Image: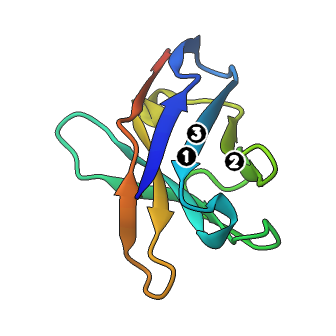
Amino acid sequence: QVQLVESGGGLVQAGGSLRLSCAASGRTFSNYRMGWFRQAPGKEREFVASISRIGSSTTYADSVKGRFTISRDNAKNVLYLQMNSLKSGDTALYYCAAYNTVTTTVDYWGQGTQVTVSS
């Protein structure tokens, strides 16, 4: 089992920045590709960004490319999402996720942290 706890969400004005953190415990954090997802009210959960086990490779949704940066600290078992130039469309509940070590499915989810961007 992997336990994931997000933090760092809040209310921010459009154009502002936030940094989300996800603290992992349980199994070895560096064994897992990690990701961030988000879900806005009335919408399906969508992919935001992912990072490889050692942080050498990252992928982003087109909607956040150039504004968000995913990173990880395997020594501290923490995943980050730096969000800059925030827009009202970024308002959502943000989830941390750990991918299955073999497939591309998500095995573990955090409980989510709310990000609200005011225009």
Position of residue 86 relative to residue 10, above or below, is: below
Residue 85 figure quarter: top right
Colouring used for the render? rainbow
* Residue farthest to the left, as pictured: 42
* Residue at mark 3 to residue at mark 2: CA–CA distance: 8 Å
Q: Residue at x 47, y 43 (%)?
A: 4
Mark 2 sits on what residue? 77
Which numbered disc, 3 or 1, marks the residue closer to the eye?
Answer: 1
Q: Nearer the viewer, residue 94 or 87?
A: 94
Q: Position of residue 40 (x, y in %)?
A: 30, 37
Q: Is residue 35 left or right of residue 70?
A: left
- For label 1, the SS is strand
Mark linked to residue 85: none
Position of residue 112 relative to residue 44, above or below, is: above
Q: Nearer the viewer, residue 8 or 25?
A: 25
Mark 3 sits on what residue? 22
Residue 90 in view here: yes
Q: Residues within 10 Å of mark 3 (few under 14, many from 20)?
A: many
Which numbered disc, 3 or 2, marks the residue closer to the eye?
Answer: 2
Q: Position of residue 119 (x, y in %)?
A: 50, 15
Mark 1 sits on what residue? 25
First of labels 1, 2 by sequence position: 1
Residue 61 figure quarter: bottom right
Amino acid of disc 2: Asn
Q: Is residue 60 left or right of residue 102?
A: right
Q: Residue at x 69, y 71 (%)?
A: 52
